Image: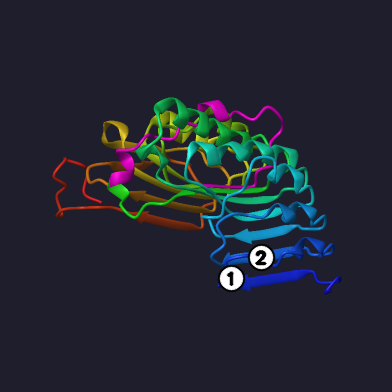
Amino acid sequence: KLLLLKYLSLANVTLLPKKFGELQYLETLDITNTRILEMPLAVTSLQWLASLNVHYHIRFTDGMIGKMQSLEELETFGVHSYEQGKPLEEFSQLTKMRRLKVQLGMFELWEGTGQIEDLHGYLGTLVSSCNLRHLNISKLSSDVLAVKTYFPLSLESWCPTTPCSLQELHITYCYIDKVPNWMSLLRNLRELEIYVVSVRPEDVRILGSIPTLLILKLKTFNGTDGRILIHGFSNLKYFHLELLYCGTSLEFEEGSMPRLEHLELEFRVHQMDCLNGSPNF
C-alpha cells in the first residue's frame, strides 16, 4: 500500500513480496544483500524504475532487460555462462541507460571457443549503446597469473556503429589481447582502465591519440621487446601503470603527457639489477 514509495532496499530475503510490482512510483530498488537468485518478472511493471542494484548471481530471463525502459543504471549484471550473456544485447534498447556494471564469471572453463567469441560479441554491443556514459566490465578472479591462461578478450569487433557517448570505460581482471583502433574514436572518453596482456607500440599510439582522455590506468604483464615508450596523451592528468613481470623498460618521449599531475608506477623487481637486462629504474 506504499504507493508513493520511491526507494526500497532489502536484505537477507530469498523472495521479493508478491505485489512489489504495484509500487508504480518506485525509482530505486536495491537487493544486493539478498539471497534472491532470479529476478521476478514483476520488475518490468515498475515503469519509473531508474536505478537497480543486484548481486551478480541474480539471473535475468530473456526479454526482461528490454522491458525496463526507464532504467538508467544497473549494478551488477552477472554473466556466468553463454546463455546468461544473451540478454546483454537488450541493453541497446534502453535509451535512458547511463551506467552499467557487468561481472563475468569464469565461463571459459566450460564453454566452447565459438560460444566464448559470441559472448565477447554480446559485450561489444554495450559500446554501441549510444547513450551509455559509464561502463564497467570485470571478471571474477583472485589469481592474476591464472587469468592470462584463459581466453583473452578481443575488442576488435566492438567498433561502435554510432557516435559513442562513453565517458568512463573500465575493463578489469579481464585481459585484452590488444588495444583496438576504434578506441581512438571515443571522443567523449575521460577515464579508461584496462588490462592488456602485452603492450605494443601501436597500443600506446592509439591510447595517446584520445584527445579527451584525462585518467588512464593500465595493467600489463610486459611490453613487447621489453620496452614501453610513452608519447602523446596531450590532456592526460592521471597515469597509473602496473607491470606484472620484471624486465620491461619504461621510457617517456620528450613532450609527452604535458599536463600530467599524478604519476603512479608499480613494478616487480628482483634486485637492483634486473635479471632480464632492463635499465635500472
Q: Circle 1 — which element?
A: loop
Which residue is at 65% across, 43% downward? 166
**Mark 1 Cα-neighbour bin, 10 Å: few <14, some 14–19, many ≥20:** few
Q: Is residue 221 visible?
A: no
Residue tagged by mark 1?
13
Q: CA distance from mark 1 to mark 2?
A: 7 Å
Colouring method of the image: rainbow
Which residues, given as a range, are shown in magenta? 146-170
Which residue is at 66% across, 34% downward? 128
Q: x, y percentage for residue 188?
A: 67, 42
Furthest residue to the front?
Answer: 18
Asked whether 101 or 250 is in front, the reply is: 101
Q: x, y percentage for residue 158?
A: 57, 30
Label 2 near label 1: C-beta < 8 Å?
yes
Residue 178 in which image quadrant: top left
Which residue is at 30% across, 36% downward? 227
Q: Is 256 one of the magenta-colored residues?
A: no
Q: Amino acid at mark 2?
A: Leu
Q: Amino acid at mark 1?
A: Val
Compared to residue 87, the image places residue 38 above or below, namely below
Q: Circle 2 — which element?
A: loop
Q: x, y percentage for residue 241?
A: 39, 50
Asked whether 209 or 38 is in front, the reply is: 38
Q: Is 155 one of the magenta-colored residues?
A: yes
